Amino acid sequence: MPAPDRAAEADERPPSPAVDRALTILETLVAADAPMTLTALAHAADVPLATCASIAQTLEIRGYASRTVVGRSHFWRPTLKLSGLAAQLDRKIDLSSLTQPFLRTLVDLTGMAAHVGVLEGTLVIYVAKVGAPGMVQFNTYPGKTAPFNLTALGRAVAAHLPEAALAPLLKRLIPGTGPNAVPVTPARMRAMLAEVRERGYAVEDEEEDAGIGCIAAPFFDAQGEVAGSIGVTGWVERVRGASLTEVVNAVTTQSALLSRELAAGRTP
């Protein structure tokens, strides 16, 4: 049996395990649907109980977490201090406001919901949305996150990442649950991203959810680096057959115009 690659294992470990654990605890609290006991929190975050207690207490002192005591149990939850930080960041990098005209144009041209996404680690974050007309609305909203490899928004960005940024993402691929989902491997994802890069847009066809299709294209900043993606979501028939060309033309045109806007320096 070949010896394990210790150098590769070391490269995958975070430089600061303490910070990594603290962020994991915070992310676990935010993702939870209800306040959590310390034992449940430690188990969900895969952090030793004593370490979890120290981190939770530090978050409480800094105002990022609070607890409610019921009998002998302590229930922890995140506070809105994170929202304050997010609001500060949003004021500095206000893609939501900047991209609204492009999103509204996409909705007018396609009749589909339009979104802007940015990549944070292995997740694509929906930072802006303009809903489609009509009564039927899709469960997307600013702040929603999804695995990058399951979404057209995420793939459109990942296709233009440098190798040093892409390689770690390919180690953390999430399998889809839609009817057209296929087993995900780094090699398969590399081939898919190469195709996205060549044609200029990404397509999701019932890979994450049944009946839902998405098309997205990247946009680039003044330095020519990928800054995010813009795309549309709707019933899957809109990303197939004759409708595909119409929707692709609309999405790629708006992504190019948005890139031109950023290249001209018209940022918030």
Image (cartoon, grey):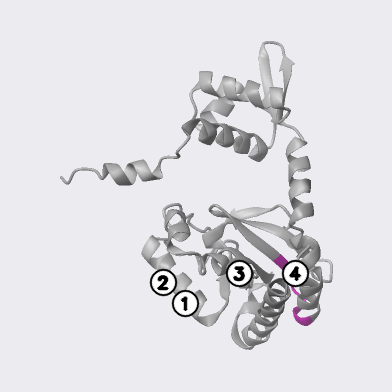
The location of residue 29, given as percent across then percent down, is 64, 34
Q: Are marks 1 and 2 in contact (CB under 8 Å)?
A: yes
Alpha carbons under labels 3 and 2: distance apart: 26 Å
Closest to the camera, between mark 4 and mark 2, is: 2
In the rendered image, the residue lying farthest to the top is 72
Foreground pick, 176 / 153: 153
Q: Which mark is residue 52?
A: none
Foreground pick, 111 / 57: 57
Describe the element under mark 1 as helix, strand or loop.
helix
Q: Earlier in the sequence, mark 1 or mark 3?
A: 1
The residue at 54%/66% (across/down) is 155
Alpha carbons under labels 4 and 1: distance apart: 24 Å
Alpha carbons under labels 1 and 2: distance apart: 6 Å
Describe the element under mark 2 as helix, strand or loop.
helix
Q: Name the residue type under label 4.
A: Ala
Q: Earlier in the sequence, mark 3 or mark 2?
A: 2
Question: Where does label 3 land, which residue?
Answer: 223
The location of residue 115, given as percent across then percent down, is 71, 66
Q: Name the residue type under label 2.
A: Ala
Question: Where does label 4 land, which residue?
Answer: 113
Question: Where does label 1 land, which residue?
Answer: 195
Alpha carbons under labels 1 and 3: distance apart: 23 Å
* Magenta-tinted stretch: 109-115
Q: Which image quarter is the N terminus in?
A: top left
Q: Which image quarter is the C terminus in?
A: bottom right
